[in-house]
Amino acid sequence: MLFRLVVLLFSLNASPAFAQALSPAAPNPQTILVLGDSLSAAHGIAQNQGWVTLMAQRLAQQSPPWKVINVSISGETTSGGLSRLPALLAAHQPQWVLIELGANDGLRGLPLKIMRQNLQRMIELSQQRGAKVLLIGMMLPPNYGFTYTTPFTTMYQQLAEEYRLPLVPFLLDGVASEPSLMQYDGLHPNAAAQPIILENVWRVAAPLWREHAGTSPVM
């Protein structure tokens, strides 16, 4: 009887299923969803040069792993992002959502009230799904007029305060004012600008991700 028990225990331990059950489960990757426009979609440059790809490469060095899903589309508006977001949240179940939208709304002179409502709804949908939100702010060229550009910029700050969100004040800080870092259209940053843009995001995000995952993202 004792011999049979020993044989049974040995066979169970030798079983791959048994060994898998005993071994600690591999950690699920922390998922970051980037919902943006052409500034995050690497418009006019190679995809592997864009700041989102550079961020993904940096986060790939972490343990447990981080996964970056870039669903940014050139020309995207806040209304377009809002219409796509529910399906994206359901499909990817991210821990973090980076919202980088509004520039195209502003360039088209769309009402700020509608833009604000769209951003609010995206924030709320993400939070309802259990995701944390990082809001990325934008600014408009001064030729759009003080009465439009000032409330446009402060809207991001107000939303961050209202929902207690971390905020990147201006994605193109240190870039938009440097012609050598912009493409010929004067609106989109070139490849040389992408590491600077990443640092603008990383400066705000890295401490939050370190706290969220219990890891230390490389600086």
Image (spheres, rainbow, N blue to C red):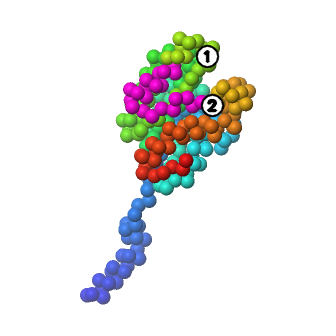
Give the secondary structure at mark 1. Answer: helix
Q: Residue 208 or 54: which is nearer the viewer?
A: 208
Q: Position of residue 188 (x, y in %)?
A: 66, 29
Quarter of the image that includes the N terminus: bottom left
User: Which stretch appears magenta?
Assistant: 152-174
Q: Is residue 196 magenta?
A: no
Q: How many marks?
A: 2
Q: Determine crowd level at label 2: few under 14, some 14-19, many 20+ residues with C-alpha closer than 10 A.
A: few
Give the secondary structure at mark 2. Answer: loop
Query: Who's the residue at 62% across and 37% down the image?
Result: 196
Residue located farthest toward the left when viewing the structure as drawn: 1
Asked if labels 1 and 2 touch by Cβ distance under 8 angstroms, the answer is no
Residue 193 at least partly seen = yes
Q: Which residue is mark 1?
A: 142
Q: Amino acid at mark 1?
A: Pro
Residue 29 at least partly seen = no
Q: Which residue is mark 2?
A: 174
Q: Position of residue 112 (x, y in %)?
A: 49, 17
Quarter of the image where one finds residue 21: bottom left
Compared across the picture, whether 188 is left or right of 111 comes to: right
Who comes first in sequence, dot 2 or dot 1? Answer: 1
Quarter of the image where one finds residue 3: bottom left
Query: Who's the residue at 57% across and 23% down the image?
Result: 139
Query: Who's the residue at 55% across and 26% down the image?
Result: 138
Compared across the picture, whether 171 is left or right of 26 comes to: right
Q: Determine crowd level at label 1: few under 14, some 14-19, many 20+ residues with C-alpha closer than 10 A.
A: few
The alpha-carbon separation of the residues under discs 2 and 1 comes to: 16 Å
